[in-house]
Amino acid sequence: MRHFIYTFLACIFILSCNTSKKTKEAEIKDERALVEKQNDTIRIANDELEYEIIIIEPGFNFWLASNARQRGHYGQSFMENRNWIYVIEWNQRVLQPQRFSPRLYELQINYEPNIDYGYEVNYLLYHYFIYFQLKYNQRLGPFVPRI
């Protein structure tokens, strides 16, 4: 009987060690999720052109800082062309809530190809489209989303 009690106590001790390991892993995941959610709103505005883009997506800032190509990698005309294709498809999906989730496609994007929004706007919008496609497993155009 004594041998059984010692064995039982040893098992509890070993299990408690594993439990603390899992707790540490859970804490690390919680910290990572907190970092991803911080600064999850990006606002781009230009009073001259009277436009404003607000991107509210938890984790986008973290993804942008850790995965996106650096500024200058893509040219502005490349991103403008891709953004135009993505915006057309996005707006079509907004208008078809019975076919595409209205939770993903809530509002239309007013993006005109003949307006020069500047490099920064096109950079952030392009990378948001890439992030969106990768995160939600969507395809907004004929191109495979890649970083």
Image (cartoon, grey):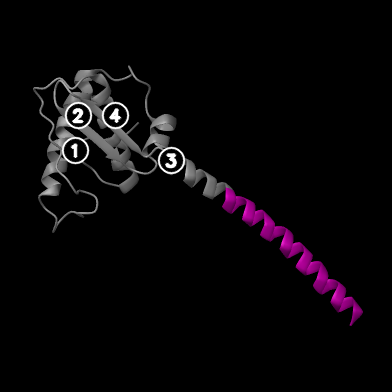
Q: Is mark 4 on a helix, strand or loop?
A: helix
Give the label, 3 or 2, closer to the camera.
3
Say which mark, if any, is on residue 124: 4
Q: How far apart are marks 4 and 2 (CA)?
A: 12 Å
Q: Could you tell me the amino acid type at mark 3?
A: Gln
Residue 79 left/right relative to 31? left
Q: Position of residue 20 (x, y in %)?
A: 68, 57
Magenta stretch: dominant SS?
Answer: helix
Q: Could you tell me the amino acid type at mark 1?
A: Gly
**Image-quadrant location for residue 108:** top left
* Residue at 13% in and 31% down: 111
| Relative vertical location of residue 122 with respect to residue 7 in this rendering, above or below | above
Q: Where is residue 143 in the image (x, y as percent from the top left)?
A: 23, 35
Q: What element carries label 3?
A: loop
Q: Circle 1 is placed at which residue position? A: 141
Crowding at label 4, few (<14), some or many (≥20) Cα neighbours within 10 Å? many
Say which mark, if any, is on residue 82: 2
Give the label, 4 or 3, closer to the camera.
3
Q: What stretch is highlighted in magenta?
A: 1-27
Q: How far apart are marks 1 and 3 (CA)?
A: 30 Å
Q: Can residue 136 be seen in the rendering of this structure? A: yes
Q: Circle 3 is placed at which residue position? A: 38
Decide whether residue 127 is among the magenta residues: no
Q: Disc 4 vs disc 1: Cβ atoms closer than 8 Å? A: no
Q: Disc 3 vs disc 2: Cβ atoms closer than 8 Å? A: no
